[in-house]
Image (cartoon, rainbow, N blue to C red):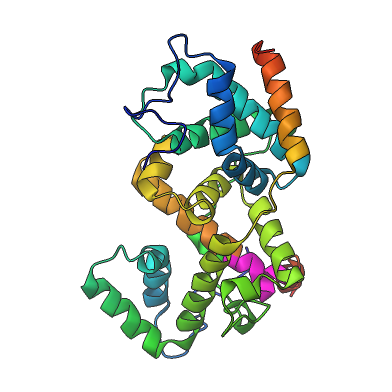
């Protein structure tokens, strides 16, 4: 963890405590698990705190990237080989 | 939702002895792609992923008589694969358990708030055409401590609900959500400017 001056806040004009409160709830916010009143509070904070807004955007993008990351399928040859190995180990042959 | 392998009662569709090669082959055919994808996301290496697929289906075959259909077959297989993955990694690498704290994810400089590779205005599919971004994402997921990686992969990549992840991981939902949040913040940080330089800026800041 990088050293941070105690009490220093990178968002001018806003309290670090407010940002921390938002940070703690961001996944629940993105997953639509929070009550409307809390969502409103978070949006209000973001409207006044560009850094938190950027942070939420980048977290949302991260989650979307994870959801859409593709994996190439296993080859038919490898599938057949693994199937044979399992048959052998399980005494199905 | 029932899969093709499931019988009318939601069971695994086994015969009287529950051990036929045909039953196994059906299970394997219907679920091998899903379990391979899961294994690849967890392990990051082809060979490890294939070993995990083999362990999972062998254990599934041996345990199929105990499957009563309370869960979907896919969730049952995820559970077996998760247990196999935990055993496999413990055996091979003896990874230390590392806890992630929220404090470590608080950005301290302007560059850390954005992703390093700008993807504004792109769909996730378009963004992922960027080879470097794909590599960074894969590396970030592999760098996650295992217990966080499992939750992130199950929830955000395999698309399980928090309740299903809680059943697979044998954790309460609150713990699942807490791990998921930390895992997402970790991956986000790795994709940000701070993650990009491999910690060099952290070293510089520490030396200042």
Q: Main secondary structure of the magenta part?
A: helix
Q: Is residue B115 above or below residue B59?
A: below
Judge from the rendering whether residue B124 lies leftward or rightward of residue B66; answer left or right.
right
Residue B86 in sight here: no
The x, y position of residue B157, in whole percent, is 54, 55
| Residue drawn at the location 57% of the way across and 48% of the way down | B149
| Residue drawn at the location 70% of the way across and 70% of the way down | B133
**In the rendered image, which quarter is residue A46 located in?**
bottom left
The front one of B8 and B201 is B8
The x, y position of residue A92, in whole percent, is 65, 13
The x, y position of residue B146, in whole percent, is 60, 43
Q: Is residue B158 above or below residue B108?
A: above
Q: Bounds of the magenta span?
A: B188-197
- From the image, which quarter does the C terminus of chain B lie in? bottom right
| Residue drawn at the location 75% of the way across and 45% of the way down | B45
Judge from the rendering whether residue B19 lies leftward or rightward of residue B91; answer left or right.
left
The x, y position of residue B186, in whole percent, is 58, 60
Residue B45 in sight here: yes
| The magenta stretch spans residue B194 | yes
| The magenta stretch spans residue B49 | no
Q: Is residue B129 above or below residue B150?
A: below
- From the image, which quarter does the N terminus of chain B lie in? top left
């Amino acid at each position: 963890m990088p050293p941070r001056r105690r009490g220093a806040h990178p968002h001018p004009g806003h309290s670090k405590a407010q940002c921390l409160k938002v940070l703690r709830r961001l996944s629940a916010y993105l997953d639509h698990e929070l009550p409307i009143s809390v969502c409103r509070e978070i949006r209000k904070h973001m409207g006044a705190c560009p850094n938190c807004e950027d942070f939420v955007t980048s977290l949302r993008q991260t989650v979307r990237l994870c959801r859409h990351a593709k994996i190439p399928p296993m080859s038919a040859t490898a599938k057949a080989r693994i199937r044979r190995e399992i048959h052998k180990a399980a005494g199905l042959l | 939702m029932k899969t093709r392998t499931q019988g009318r009662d939601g069971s695994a569709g086994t015969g009287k002895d529950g051990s036929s090669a045909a039953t196994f082959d059906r299970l394997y055919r219907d679920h091998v792609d899903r379990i391979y994808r899961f294994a690849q996301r967890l392990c990051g290496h082809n060979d490890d992923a294939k070993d995990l697929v083999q362990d999972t289906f062998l254990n599934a075959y041996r345990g199929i008589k105990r499957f009563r259909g309370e869960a979907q077959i896919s969730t049952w297989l995820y559970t077996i694969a998760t247990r196999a993955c935990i055993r496999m990694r413990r055996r091979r690498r003896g990874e230390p358990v590392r806890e992630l704290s929220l404090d470590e994810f608080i950005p301290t400089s302007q560059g850390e708030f954005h992703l390093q590779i700008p993807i504004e205005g792109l769909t996730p599919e378009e963004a992922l055409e960027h080879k470097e971004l794909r590599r960074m994402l894969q590396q970030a997921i592999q760098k996650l401590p295992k217990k966080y990686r499992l939750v992130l992969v199950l929830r955000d990549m395999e698309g399980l609900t928090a309740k299903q992840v809680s059943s697979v991981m044998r954790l309460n939902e609150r713990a699942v959500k807490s791990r998921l949040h930390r895992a997402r913040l970790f991956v986000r940080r790795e994709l940000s400017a701070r993650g990009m330089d491999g910690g060099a800026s952290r070293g510089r800041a520490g030396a200042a």
